[in-house]
Structures are given as structure tokens and as C-alpha cells.
């Protein structure tokens, strides 16, 4: 004799994750940028913030700092080399290194400083 189990919609609903009415809000607190000229066109940025929804938010903050720094130094472009991210006690930090240059550098992660700074201003992300 073969028995079949009947699966009701109520049983299936129990398998779905519970939905909540909570919405995570992006309420960042940008805590500052420390800039260090390492050598020639190589620059290191230490940024920290709270209220980030994820690593992308703190990475954007570092990119905004790099773009503004490039403009301050009279350059129009930057190229991302590396970023180390950390989160501890709700505080996100990034240690990012960029090269700055007057012409578009080679590489995949290049930024046009003027365009990035304009986007940062639009999105309320402070720069250097």
C-alpha cells in the first residue's frame, strides 16, 4: 500500500521565512578621513563610519575621499589599488590605497575624480 502525504498551503507557509515590518534605514555617521601621501602618486586613506549597511558604503566613502584628494592635488584621476575593510562594535573602517594621476591611468578600477566628487555631493557623502 502506497501512502501519499498531503501538503497544505498552511504547511508550506510554515517553511517560508517570517516577514517583518522593520526596514533598515541608511543613517550614516561619517567619522572622518586620515590621508597619508606614501610616495609620489601613492596615497593611503583611513576612513571610519557608523550606520553603514555593508562594506559598499564604507568603500564609497573612501572613494569619495580619494577623488577629492586627487582634485586638491591638481589631478583628474585616481586608480584603486586595494582596500582593507573592518567592522568592530558597529564602526566600519577602511584602509584604502589609490594612485592619483593627471591622465586616465591603466587598470580596471579607475575613477574620474570630478565625476565621483559630484556623485558624492549628490549622495551626501563627505570628501576630504
Image (spheres, grey):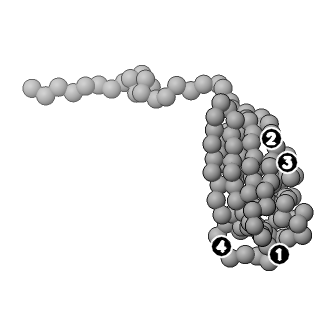
Residue 100 on image: x %, y %: 78, 68
User: Which of the two discs, 2 and 1, labels the residue nearer the N terminus?
Assistant: 2
In the rendered view, would you say 1 is above or below 62? Answer: above
Q: Which of pointers 1 and 3 indicates the residue nearer the eye?
A: 1
Q: How many marks?
A: 4
Q: Which residue is mark 3?
A: 126
In the rendered view, would you say 25 is above or below 47? Answer: above
Q: CA distance from mark 1 to mark 3?
A: 23 Å
Residue 37 tag number:
none
Residue 30 tag number:
2
User: Which of the two discs, 4 and 1, labels the residue nearer the N terminus?
Assistant: 1
Q: Does the image show residue 92? A: yes
43 horizontally vs 21: left or right? right
In the rendered view, would you say 4 is above or below 91? Answer: above
Residue 107 on image: x %, y %: 65, 73
Residue 107 tag number:
4
Q: CA distance from mark 3 to mark 4?
A: 26 Å
Q: Quarter of the image containing the N terminus?
A: top left
Q: Secondary structure at mark 3?
A: loop
Label 2 packing within 10 angstroms: few (<14), some (14-19), many (20+)? some
Amino acid at each position: 500500500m502506497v501512502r501519499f502525504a498531503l501538503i497544505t498551503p498552511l504547511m508550506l507557509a510554515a517553511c517560508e521565512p517570517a516577514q517583518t515590518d522593520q526596514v533598515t534605514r541608511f543613517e550614516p555617521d561619517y567619522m572622518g578621513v586620515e590621508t597619508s601621501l606614501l610616495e609620489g602618486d601613492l596615497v593611503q586613506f583611513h576612513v571610519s563610519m557608523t550606520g553603514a549597511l555593508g562594506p559598499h558604503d564604507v568603500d564609497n566613502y573612501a572613494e569619495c575621499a580619494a577623488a577629492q584628494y586627487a582634485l586638491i592635488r591638481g589631478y583628474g584621476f585616481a586608480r584603486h589599488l586595494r582596500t582593507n575593510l573592518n567592522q568592530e562594535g558597529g564602526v566600519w573602517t577602511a584602509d584604502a590605497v589609490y594612485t592619483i594621476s593627471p591622465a586616465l591611468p591603466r587598470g580596471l578600477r579607475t575613477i574620474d575624480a570630478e565625476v565621483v566628487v559630484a556623485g558624492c555631493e549628490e549622495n551626501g557623502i563627505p570628501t576630504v
